[in-house]
Amino acid sequence: MSNAEIGLIGLGTMGAALALNIADNGFGIAVWNRTTEKTTAFVDDAGPLANKITPTQTLKELVAAIKIPRAIILMVPAGQAVDDQIAALRPLLDDDDMIIDAGNANFHDTNRRAQEASDLPFLGIGVSGGEEGARFGPSIMGGGSQAYWDRVAHILTAISAKHEGAPCATWMGEEGAGHFVKAVHNGIEYADMQMIAEVYGVMRDGLGLDSAAIGDTFAKWDTGPLRSYLVEISGKVATTVDPKTGKPMLDVIVDAAGQKGTGRWTAIEAQHLAAPIPAIEAAVVARNLSSQRDARAAGEDLFGAAPRHMAHDVMPLETLEEALIAGKIIAYAQGFDMIEKASDEFGWALPLPAIAEVWRQGCIIRSDMLDDMATALRENPERNLMMAPRFADTLKKTHGALRQVVAQGALHGIAMPALSSGLAYFDAMRTARGTANMIQGQRDFFGAHGFERIDGGTGQHGPWGD
Ligand code: 6PG
């Protein structure tokens, strides 16, 4: 019987959570997984929601169980699996049935898939919030034709997180626009996480605080301007104890960060767009470096451990908090600037204020600050966020703290790639006369590339002395 509102393929962690969320919001959903045991177990565990869920054993059965015109969400691993799934599903569908890729696809793949779909309905949507978000309200960034989005918007907005009643689900633009915005979200996520980790490093290695004290500090910061999901969970991570050893959990975790690639995609794309996002790039580099554990250990043997220990009076916790506030504003400003550049480059008209709005709840980077960012972007979406009056005021008050933290880090050998590159970006962005005149001189000297004069002449070459 064709009565489910929507279908879903892929009952992994995110797919299963999203399917329960859809059922919980009153929509009938038909589900299919490559292995039927998973489908059976999923429905068995669904409790009262099971009566909204139609388990199916074949793709044909799945298609038959959904109302016409159909909409089917794919929640399969990004990459070839998505193409394979589309190839298996498309021949079973009618021409106005829609496929929705809700995985973490590379937006270039989504552009291609949208083009390959031609006039067959296809959407690529970015979904953020991890398992809990998918289950109880993620942030959703839609991409594809707006008419296709409108067909399923009632379901996607119903299942999304809400900020003071406003759904955190918005159509971003054509083709891969939703997945592009999700990638930048993840780039910002990397920078935010890295900056928190760097500040954790100062507390642990510089100030010698134990994990419980560090956890308390994050918990305290989570009641102020830094209030955010990532600061909140960092506090919880720091105060958790390993049941096996009784030690702080942080002390038993290997210091090598994993990554599925979305942060890297953002960094690569930023280079294509010539969008300066150094704090985000530094966060990706820091993850890469973290994996080189043997080389780092050899380096410590060879050069000796850095002095690291700091006197408490050179690094009050308030200074660290202010540095993190400044770093966060700078990293987000970079992410939004990249979105603006992509919008021009790809002709997408990406809605910057609405992007800040859908990130206010549900997603991993949700924070109070994003509400102010949304307001600042509503006032003027083209201005660099650092220059918006409310953030300029905060930066005027906090960049000194960022400078102090980065300087003390440098003096004590505590690496701070994201905070220090954030500071360099800030300083570059407040310097009207930079030093690229020297680069231009060098380029012209060895390559006769010509240069522009400050008095208005163009295309000058030399003359240079010997
Ligand atoms: C989200 C997250 C999520 C991400 C994982 C792992 O917004 O819910 O960004 O999409 O894929 O958190 O990412 P990494 O493995 O790259 O850290």
Image (cartoon, grey):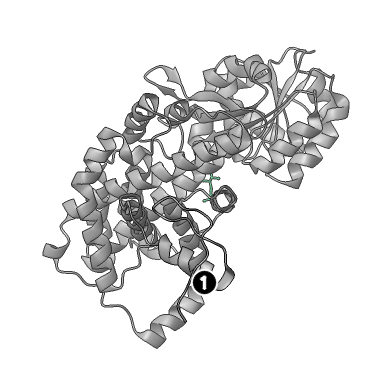
Residue 24, image x, y percentages:
55, 20
Q: Residue at x 21, y 45 (%)?
A: 396
**Within 10 angstroms of label 1, few (less than 14), some, or many (20 or more) residues?**
some
Q: Quadrant of the N terminus?
A: top right
Residue underneath mark 1: 445
Residue 123: image location, x then y, percent? 68, 28
Disc 1 beta carbon < 8 A from ligand 1? no
**Vertical comparison of 197 with 52: above or below:** below
Q: Residue at x 65, y 28 (%)?
A: 174
Identity of the residue drawn at 53% across and 19% down = 157
* Amino acid type of the residue that numbered disc 1 sits on in the rendered structure: Phe
**Rendering quarter of residue 403:** bottom left
Q: Is residue 216 visible?
A: no
**How far across and how far down the image is residue 365, in percent?**
42, 39
Q: Relative to residue 268, is residue 234 drawn left or right?
A: left
Q: For the view shown, which residue lies furthest in the right direction?
A: 91
Against 111, is 80 above or below? below
In the displayed structure, does residue 270 sit left or right of residue 32? left
**Helix, strand or loop status at disc 1:** helix
In the rendered view, would you say 136 is above or below 194? above
* Residue 296 in the image: above or below residue 69: below
The residue nearer to you, when weighing 12 against 100, is 100
